[in-house]
């Protein structure tokens, strides 16, 4: 496995945002931010490609907003 500084920094950023989503989802009792936060905090451990890391992270960051907009969750 090859790690670069960029991948590590991006992983830390997505992990920190994921912890925030998780805490918000837990306090507000909202399942979508809770699950997205948990996945955001964990997935950088397994993804080492920068493009894949950013793509998955952006989708997970947008998921709670998309769920609220489309489904009212």
Image (cartoon, rainbow, N blue to C red):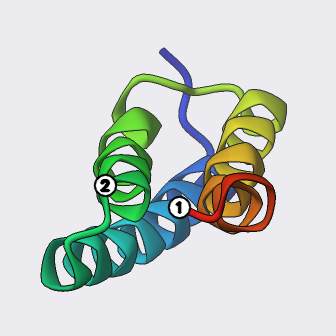
Dots 2 and 1: beta carbons under 8 Å? yes
How far separated are the C-alphas under marks 2 and 1? Answer: 9 Å
Image-quadrant location for residue 18: bottom left
Horizontal and vertical percent for residue 15? 39, 62
In the rendered image of this protein, does residue 7 appear above or below residue 23? above
What label does residue 47 carry, if any? none
* Residue indicated by mark 2: 31
Residue 34: x percent and y percent? 29, 59
Point out residue 6 in the picture as x, y percentages from the top left corner. 69, 57
Q: Residue at x 15, y 85 (%)?
A: 27
Residue located 68% across and 53% down the image: 71
Q: Nearer the viewer, residue 19 or 1?
A: 19
Task: Give the labeled residue for mark 1.
Answer: 73
- Please tell me whether residue 51 is drawn above or below residue 59 in the rendered image: above
Q: Farthest residue toward the front?
A: 72
Q: Which secondary structure, mark 1? A: loop
Q: Secondary structure at mark 2?
A: helix
């Amino acid at each position: 496995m090859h790690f670069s500084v960029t991948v590590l920094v991006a992983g830390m950023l997505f992990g920190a945002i994921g912890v925030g989503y998780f805490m918000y989802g837990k306090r507000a009792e909202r399942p979508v931010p809770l699950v997205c936060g948990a996945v955001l905090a964990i997935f950088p451990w397994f993804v080492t490609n920068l493009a894949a890391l950013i793509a998955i992270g952006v989708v997970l960051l947008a998921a709670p907003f998309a769920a609220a907009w489309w489904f009212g969750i």
